[in-house]
Amino acid sequence: MKKNIFKHKSGSKSQECNVDPFLFVPLVTLISLGFVMVASASFSFAEHRFGNVFFFAGRHAIYILLAALVAVTAYKVPPQQLRSHGRLWMFFSILMLIAVLIPGIGKELNGSKRWLSLAGFTFQVAEFAKISVIVFLADYLARHRLVFAKELSKLAFIVGLISLVAVLLISQPDYGSVVVIGGIFMALLFVGNVRLRDYLILFLLAGFGLWWSAGAAPYRLARLTSFLDPWADQFAAGYQLTQSLIAFGRGEWWGLGLGQSVQKMRYLPEAHTDFVFAIFAEEFGFFGVLILLTIFMILIGRIFQLSFRAINAGDWYASYFLVGVGLFIGGQTFINLGVNAGLLPTKGLTLPFISYGGTSLICCCLLMGMSMRISNDLKIASNEGVRRNRNA
């Protein structure tokens, strides 16, 4: 019999507020570091482009306030209520992914149509699509977990839906988001009781699809090959990566100190967004990087720990959702760090909680607010179980 640990009654002890320190402290630390690094990495470009060294820092401060408001709101909403709207989330995500491709509606930047403009602020649709995929997949897999191995139609439906999302993202084009969503999808299927034979077939098809789409566009193929030897074409295809590697080399063990980066002086493109980690490495060095990675590992490790706790509590939706959140933050962090260090081809993915970008920050904080609510409810359910055992 399925347990529902998230069904609360008003006025009961389940209304207690217990913020998980292993989620909250790393989250606040990362957001604080992100604000400092955005301010440090962007001042040269901001002064050159807008005549105001604090242009990006000021906007990022607004994003932080909005993200905090979104996180608090998500924390106050019961997970079951958010789960019940999973299909609606997915529907609106697909609509926005289509709308962003329509001329006059989607905003084009550097040859990509990934943004919708609203009141002077831009909204990157792919970030909301990632959240929708996590919420929808967690609900879908939880509802059909026992029949997934028997009814192929259940698997075919979800494969077709995610394939549609992938096609729309590639049309923008946003290959990096396709990789992230595809990775989350395949990982959740693996833990979602799908038959191994079906999973392996789907894995091979997905791998072929990614390989084909990567080679179909010349610029993607150039990125895939240039990262192997960026110095062979350091003033064209390999320019951004070579400048990033120079930043890592200048950082050495202890870094040059906060604000002392040279590469952010318009040598390294996107220094405050996709490549802010390279500036962090230059200013704080190897040991600073270790500290940053440790904070990320504490946060991601705690999310996966909570997913196992949700399994023991009998709530598969919470478990799948937390696995999706952990994979999203961990996967995007790994890809961004790998791109900055030259281990992976260049992708337009931000570093969660650190890079400049309102949509990414707000969406990540939304997921963290939902995760902290689940953590709170798991703790309440555990305490109530202990009390019942004592009274028995």
Image (spheres, rainbow, N blue to C red):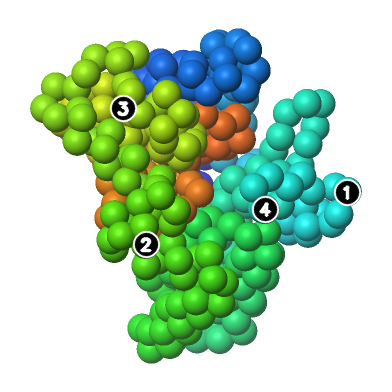
For label 1, the residue is 104
Q: Nearer the viewer, residue 343 or 69?
A: 343
Give the Cα distance between marks 2 and 1: 34 Å
Give the Cα distance between marks 3 and 1: 37 Å
Secondary structure at numbered mark 2: helix
For badge 2, the amino acid type reads: Ser
Nearer the camera: disc 2 or disc 1: 2
Counting every numbered tag in the picture gives 4
* Vertical placement of residue 95 versus 370, above or below: below
Whether residues under marks 4 and 1 lie with C-beta atoms below 8 angstroms apart, the answer is no
Residue at position x 33%, y 40% in the image: 244
For badge 3, the amino acid type reads: Phe
Picture coordinates of residue 298, whole percent (x, y): 25, 34
Q: Quadrant of residue 173?
A: bottom right
Nearer the camera: disc 4 or disc 1: 4
Picture coordinates of residue 347, whole percent (x, y): 46, 53
**Quick check: 147 left or right of 187?**
right
For label 3, the residue is 280
For label 2, the residue is 226
